[in-house]
Amino acid sequence: MSETVVVIGAGPAGMMAAGKAAERGKKVILVEKNRNVGKKLLITGKGRCNITNNTDVEGIINNIAGNGIFLYSSLYSFSNRDIIDFFEKKGLKTKVERGGRVFPVSDKSEDVVKVLYKHCLDNGVRLVTSCSANGLELDNGKVKGVLTGKKKIECDCAVIATGGKSYQATGSNGDGYRLAKEAGHDIIAPKPSLVPLVSGDAFIKELQGLSLRNIEVKFFNSAKNMIYKDFGEMIFTHFGISGPVILSGSRFIGAKGVKNAYVLIDLKPALDMLKLDKRIQRDFEKYSGKQFKNSLGDLLPSGLIPVIVGFSGIDEKKKVNQITRAERLALGKLLKAFKVNIKGTRPINEAIVTAGGVKTDQIDPATMESKKVKGLFFAGEVIDVDGYTGGYNLTIAFSTGFCAGINC
Ligand SMILES: Cc1cc2nc3c(=O)[nH]c(=O)nc-3n(C[C@H](O)[C@H](O)[C@H](O)COP(=O)(O)OP(=O)(O)OC[C@H]3O[C@@H](n4cnc5c(N)ncnc54)[C@H](O)[C@@H]3O)c2cc1C
């Protein structure tokens, strides 16, 4: 008789694992608490699903902010290229966009869900929806069954693929951490990653809706040590700051906030201080007869000008040809290091991914099997790994899901 595998959670990691295990002849039962599979997957990439990234394995590892090294084995078993092949072979055409982001040509995440669903059904996976796993039965350090309500599903292996703790309405509410903990694993405290930052600065509301491109951000802690640096796009919101470069750095701030953290925005990263000063001088010559507040239109987006003027210490009505060299140099400094004070992050429920999870040194990176409980495997966001934006988190889910599926 073939061995029975219970996979808990029908997200990308769980569906990949279930389909692969069934393909190998295992009797697979996939348990999902929602009525439908892939609820979070449907909202990924703003409904377009950024499946993976078109880089190499090193490129993937470099974009895993937490515990990338743990993923070498699984990525060499099932890489980003294999992920693209997997979907293409199943009829889902893909395309590469800015920054190597891979999307379905259809721009529809539901097409990705359909492929994974079919991958399960075609291989004979038994899907049980509206069913929550709430315990594991162990015997002598080995998995014996999965408990759902009052029922027990007997099995030889179980895969915990329950996701993280964010966007809880999608079903990922941290159940997997409890299951893993009860089975004797340590959990690195879950914290929000890829989450907007909250600022108490009064000027933030004035800038709400303003997006900035080609800027550089540097994150600092209270000891004035730089904890993160990035280049790209960001946006001001009613509560603080968001957008790609802010989300990527947010894991270094943490849920409670690094006390007195702040972000310095370099509004002109392509120009060093000398070149920027020359540029400002040119603009000041061009607008020499105008008031200061009307002289920055070539340099800055209009929404930002009143705030910069306010912080510059230069009277907004001062004639440009009366601005002193010291005032001009101070303006240059302000443009190279515009400060936003940070109080913390938005709540974990608003985070795109959860950092933290099952401690990686308690999982065999080559198989995804627990080192503590025989027959227990982990896949996806429940593990203490998290990536930046760009398709890296789904890469983690697919790659670790595949690895669990071929080893369980
Ligand atoms: C808004 C948003 C956009 C995103 N966009 C992208 C993107 O474009 N590209 C990218 O790479 N990443 C993206 N991510 C991150 C990505 O969606 C996740 O990292 C990924 O879904 C994790 O996959 P998973 O299978 O581990 O967990 P999940 O997708 O969270 O799936 C876990 C499943 O387990 C089920 N479950 C939980 N507990 C139980 C239980 N006790 N019993 C039974 N079932 C249970 C849940 O209902 C859920 O269906 C995005 C995330 C969000 C929130």
Image (cartoon, grey):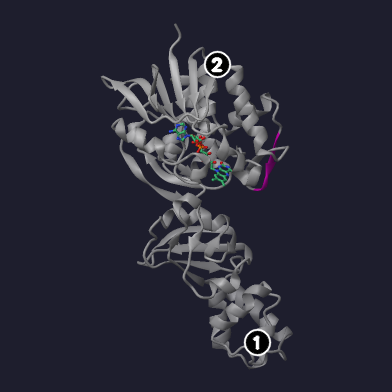
Q: Position of residue 310 (x, y in %)?
A: 56, 83
Is label 2 in a helix, a strand or a loop? Answer: helix
Amino acid type for the residue under numbered disc 2:
Glu
What residue is shown at x 45% (from left), y 9% (from top)? 2
Q: Position of residue 78 (x, y in %)?
A: 53, 28
Q: Which mark is residue 269?
A: none
What residue is shown at x 55% (from left), y 47% (from top)? 389
Is label 1 in a helix, a strand or a loop? Answer: helix
Amino acid type for the residue under numbered disc 1:
Phe
The answer to which of 154 and 300 lies nearer the viewer is 154
Q: Which mark is residue 292?
A: 1
- Residue 375: in sight, yes or no? no
- Residue 279: in sight, yes or no? yes
Q: Position of residue 257 (x, y in %)?
A: 39, 60
Q: Is residue 210 above or below residue 21?
A: below
Q: Position of residue 153 (x, y in %)?
A: 41, 19
| Cβ at disc 1 under 8 Å from ligand 1 | no
Cα separation between marks 1 and 2:
70 Å
- Queried whether the magenta region covers residue 405, the answer comes back as no
Residue 215 as seen in the image, left or right of residue 287: left
Task: Give the class, few, some or many, for how many residues have Cα within 10 Å of label 1's Cα (few <14, many ≥20).
Answer: many
Task: Give the class, few, some or many, for how many residues have Cα within 10 Å of label 2's Cα (few <14, many ≥20).
Answer: some
Total numbered labels placed on residues in the image: 2
The answer to which of 398 and 71 lies nearer the viewer is 398
Query: Which is closer to the viewer, label 1 or label 2?
Result: 2
The answer to which of 105 and 177 lies nearer the viewer is 177
Q: Main secondary structure of the magenta part?
A: strand
Image quadrant for the C terminus?
Answer: top left
| Cβ at disc 2 under 8 Å from ligand 1 | no
Write the start and end of the magenta stretch as one range.
94-98
Residue occupied by mark 2:
23
